Image (cartoon, rainbow, N blue to C red):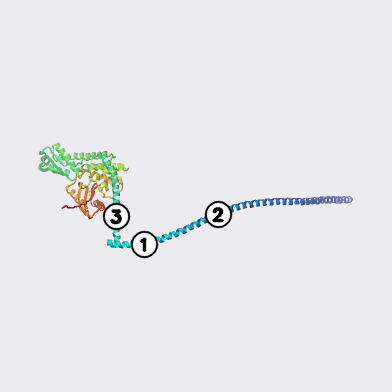
Amino acid sequence: MDNFVVILLTGLASFVVGGGITIFFYVQKLKRAKATASELVESAQKESVNIKREIKLEAKDEALKIRDRAEHDAREKMKEVRQLEKKLEKRELYMDRKMDVADKRAEELELKDKKLNDTREDLEHKKTEIAEIKDQQLEKLEKIAGLTSEQAQDRLKEELIEDTRMKVADTTREIKDKAMREANKEAQKIIVSAIQRSAADHTAETTVSVVNLPSDNMKGRIIGREGRNIRHFESLTGIELIVDDTPEAVVLSGFDPVRREIARVTLENLIKDGRIHPSRIEAMFEKAKKEVDEAIMRAAEDAIDEVSLPPLNKNMMKILGKLKYRTSYGQNVLKHSIEVAWLAGLMASELGLDGTLAKRAGLLHDIGKAIDRNVTGTHASLGADIARRFKEKDIIVNAIASHHEEVEMTGSISVLVQAADQISGSRQGARGDTLENYIQRLEKLEGIAESFDGVSKSYAIQAGREVRVLVENEKIDDNAADVIADQVAQKIQQDLTFPGQIKVVVLREHRSVSYAK
């Protein structure tokens, strides 16, 4: 128990002593802390005073800098202001000078305006005087001329209109003559070149219809007993055999030229053979058909080779070759077609067109004449149908169909084929014509020319290639004569169909007659 108390007391004593020591140290520490805090406060106060002093110094420096900059900017601004003031002063001086010049100009303009007004008044006064003088002169002129002012104006208008008409006619004639000279020169160059280079055989061939006999005794053998040979021959060939009094000759007459050629070959072979009877006639007829067919193909091949074209369809070549036995106005149609092909091809080459296409169209343009005797329709439309059936190009079909203007032309090739056809058909000696048709054509030409007022007489000359028209001198002047020439030419184009061209020449003659007594 005593030990416990001792321990307890010892513990308490230790606690009190420890607590006291702790409190002592704490108090000492607190005192040191307060002393440190006081030092810190005093140091902070000193530091703040220094900072304030530095800030004030920096603020003063900055203020000085700002003031310096402001003063510098102000000085610069003042310089600019002074420069502007100088410019303004110069501008004011310039404007003052301008104003002075403008004032002087205004004064001058006022003087000029015044002068113009004075001049205008003088002009008005003179105009009035001129008008009065003009009226007086008009009155005098009316009295002298016996015409009123309106009548004089009407006469003047008529004279002006007539003068203008004459000038227009002169100008038109000059332009027309120049255009015709240039066009004719170029056209002649192309056509002459084409004709010179074509070198085609111009000899017109006709189908032979007369067969020569070795003697007149052969006529009896041809007729046969009771006419059986001639009847069989005619029924087989479809050609009429005329045996008349012509010495040593018989005549073959038929509608189809190919059939007539077959009959001619058949008869000549019978004459050479000497045996003439129905069975031999049949044999010779079949042989002649083969010979003519071969001749037709050779003619077509030769024509194609002559114009340097590629081969045609075989059936078309058969049709083309038949033209060898067809003539038109005495002109062999196949020769004519070859000539047209050359002319059309050469003209196309000169103009920069397809020469081969033009030659093909020219060669085939009259192919319808090979069948036109057996089928209804014009040879142009029939030829176009043939070309269309054998798949020819549209431009070739159109050239065939339009070369007599039955349909509208759709290309330059068609125009060239028509021109070549007219050149070939209208050249001198190419075609024959009956006297009756020739006279009718001349009468129509003269009738057209004489249908115009002022025409006294007309004459068709140069085989209808030129019309001379005589006009009445009192009614028709030179300019009106030019107009009549154009009108007659247009009327001929509308009313007549003709190859080539027809020249219209209007003649106006003035005769002065006097008698000495």
Disc 1 vs disc 3: Cβ atoms closer than 8 Å?
no
Q: Name the residue under label 1.
A: 129
Q: How crowded is mark 2: few (under 14 residues within 10 Å), some or many (20 or more)?
A: few
Disc 3 crowd, CA 10 A, few/some/many (<14, 14-19, 20+) = few
Q: What is the distance, in whole Å, between disc 2 and disc 3 at their CAs?
A: 68 Å
User: Which residue is pictured at 45% across the width and 60% down the height?
Assistant: 114
Which label sits in the foreground, 2 or 3? 2
Please state which of residues 334 and 455 is positioned toward the viewer in this rendering. Answer: 455
Q: Residue 93 carries which label?
A: 2
Mark 2 or 1: in front is 1
Give the total number of marks visible in the rendering: 3
The amino acid beneath tag 1 is Glu
Q: Could you tell me the amino acid type at mark 3?
A: Asp
Q: Nearer the viewer, residue 85 or 505?
A: 85
Badge 2 element: helix
Toward the viewer: 149 or 506?
149
